[in-house]
């Protein structure tokens, strides 16, 4: 059983999708701690309902990004987590974060990386940019996070159709329902089953062990 730590900032629907898969026995792990950058995040309620420990660490209480990142690292190390999931975490952390947790941090991005990603592309802004560009396909990406924004070996991606009358809100909902809430819990389950191997910038997914032996 792996111990999972989650960082959140908002509604936490991706956190909920992971909680649902844990509760249905689909992830060989438990949620040790949920840390929010925002005391009003609804994600905290979801965590409490599941029985997970919660903590609010607000960037306003720290002098700079590095100090804030170090506080997050301390809280996660204390819980001895094996995997950290960024579930709609809207802050850019100091690179010391991914150095402290190499190949242990997973992020969900609401587009097909390397499109519509990087600084400024978060939440609804991503879907606004997709509609402005006029692409016909978008989607979601789960990747291991390295020190750069929306960067690191890609684990799973799923494409989603863009429709002519979409608004950013409608498109966001479709991307969540058809892609994010499926591939993020799935990637966590694969990690917990030790089926992910990073090979340079690529991730190999090992076959599920079968048979009787
Ligand atoms: C999700 O669409 C997630 O992919 C995105 O914000 C939303 C959070 O929703 N994350 C980013 O843009 C991070 N770069 P949630 O709180 O309901 O999971």
Image (cartoon, rainbow, N blue to C red):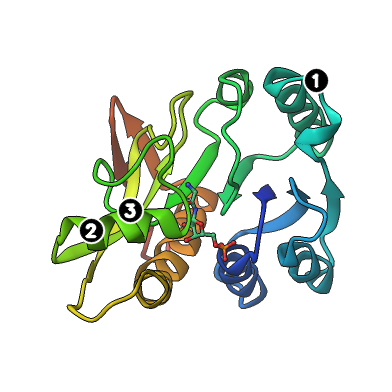
With 82 as the anchor, is 128 left or right in this view? Answer: left
Indicate which disc residue 63 carries: 1
Earlier-in-chain disc, 3 versus 1: 1
For label 3, being within 8 Å of ligand 1 is answered no
Residue topped by disc 3: 156
Earlier-in-chain disc, 2 versus 3: 2
Q: Nearer the viewer, residue 166 or 46?
A: 166
Q: Position of residue 154 (x, y in %)?
A: 33, 42
Earlier-in-chain disc, 1 versus 2: 1
Q: Position of residue 130 (x, y in %)?
A: 26, 58
Residue topped by disc 2: 132
Secondary structure under the numbered disc 1 in the rendered image: loop
Q: Residue furthest bottom?
A: 165
Disc 3 packing (10 Å; few <14; some 14–19; many ≥20): many
Secondary structure under the numbered disc 2 in the rendered image: helix
Q: Residue at x 50, y 58 (%)?
A: 189
**Disc 1 vs disc 2: which is toward the camera?**
2
How far apart marks 1 and 2 lie (CA) works out to 37 Å
Q: Residue furthest front?
A: 132
Q: Is residue 206 visible?
A: no
Q: Residue at x 56, y 33 (%)?
A: 92
Q: Is residue 168 above or below residue 6?
A: below
Q: Is residue 112 above or below residue 46?
A: above
Q: Nearer the viewer, residue 80 or 165?
A: 165
Disc 2 packing (10 Å; few <14; some 14–19; many ≥20): few
**Disc 3 vs disc 1: which is toward the camera?**
1
Q: Is residue 61 visible?
A: yes
Q: Residue at x 56, y 54 (%)?
A: 88
Name the quadrant containing residue 211: bottom left
């Amino acid at each position: 059983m792996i111990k999972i730590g989650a960082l959140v900032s908002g509604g936490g629907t991706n956190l909920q999708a992971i909680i649902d898969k844990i509760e249905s026995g689909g992830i060989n792990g438990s949620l040790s701690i949920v840390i929010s950058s925002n005391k009003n995040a609804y994600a905290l309620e979801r965590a409490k309902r599941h029985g997970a420990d919660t903590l609010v660490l607000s960037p306003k209480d720290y002098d700079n990004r590095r100090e804030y990142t170090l506080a997050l690292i301390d809280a996660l190390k204390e819980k001895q987590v094996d995997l950290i999931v960024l579930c709609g975490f809207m802050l850019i952390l100091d690179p010391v974060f991914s150095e402290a947790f190499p190949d242990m941090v997973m992020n969900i991005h609401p587009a097909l990386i390397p499109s519509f990603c990087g600084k400024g592309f978060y939440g609804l802004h991503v879907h606004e940019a997709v509609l402005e560009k006029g692409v016909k396909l978008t989607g979601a990406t789960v990747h291991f996070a390295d020190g750069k924004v929306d960067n690191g070996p890609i684990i799973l991606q799923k494409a989603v159709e863009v429709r002519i009358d979409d608004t950013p809100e409608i498109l966001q909902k479709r991307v969540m329902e058809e892609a994010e809430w499926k591939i993020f819990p799935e990637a966590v389950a694969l990690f917990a089953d030790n089926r992910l191997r990073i090979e340079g910038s690529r991730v190999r997914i090992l076959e599920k062990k079968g048979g009787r032996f």
